[in-house]
Amino acid sequence: MRYEGMIYRPPSEAYSLLVQVTIGCSHNSCTFCSMYIDKQFRVRDEAEVFKDLEEARAMYSYVDRVFLCDGDALCLSSDRLVRILDKIYTLFPECERVNVYGNTIDVLAKTPEELSMLAEHGMKMVYLGAESGDPAVLKAIRKGSTREEIIAAVQTLESSGIKTSVTFISGLDGKAGWRDHAVNTGTMITEMGASYVALLTLMLDPRTEIARQIREGEFELLSPEEVVAETYLMLENADPVKPCVFRSNHASNYLSLRGNLPDDKERMLAQLRNAMKDSGMLKDERFRAL
């Protein structure tokens, strides 16, 4: 198995076989992100990917999960993705799922028929970073996608048989616009119909554009208590009709929340209210991590 540079995967892919099909991220312009800052984006040669899979088969007696890296494996053509999926399930008949990172532009570039074909060949879930439901925030962080496009991408994937896990980031608009960020993120969760929603909290790499904005006084970070208030307002406005697994238990979060929307909404709001009264419930800054 060959890996280039630092490898990132979602927490739920901790026990998956990680296979790089692309290097880096084709967008790589978000102001808060440094994951692929040291990589020049390119698509890996298909023969190299197949060789890695064959080597993994020789190394591991049992592989039930595969995750395709790097930042947006879904940018590959549907035909190439089908060949990779077929190779995985041929080599690893015990495999139960193949998941990928994807971005909105990659999703919308594929037809519903193509996405249904990928689902039929074993693509189970796409992890998609929405970051915020607020149009102004999306523009400020240079996300490259609008609120409407993100919602359309999630709905298209879900209707094609591929589940989505959508990530948002607490504190992403700082003190200036946290209320709009919270409300519009909540209403996006209501509208888009994702199977899973994950909430992270902003952490800084000094190399990022947003870190520069903070150093130069253009952006003011939320306090831990303000992050809790923002999360409360976001959940107040999240009322999905389709059941949605909600997680805010990433290492970056000040307070761990786990539940399903809408069933567990009131319980999680109560947890947040308790944390507002007792800041001792919040994770110490020393123990937060990406």
Image: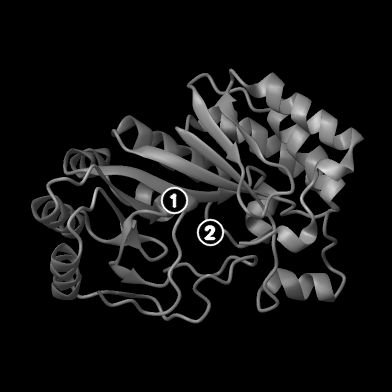
Q: Are marks 1 and 2 in contact (CB under 8 Å)?
A: yes
Quadrant location of residue 256?
top right
In percent of width and height, residue 109 lies at 33, 52
Q: Nearer the viewer, residue 225 or 105?
A: 225
Residue 262 seen anywhere in this rendered image of the structure:
yes
248 displayed left or right of 48: right
Q: Give the residue at x 42% y 34%.
A: 155
Q: Residues within 10 Å of mark 2 (few under 14, many from 20)?
A: some
How far across and down, in percent of the image, does residue 138 sit?
Answer: 63, 53
Type of the residue with mark 2: Gly
The residue identified by callout 1 is 104
Type of residue at label 1? Thr
Dot 2 falls on a residue whose secondary structure is loop
Q: Label 2, on which residue?
A: 144
Q: Quadrant of residue 273?
A: top right
In x, y percent, where is residue 133? 63, 42
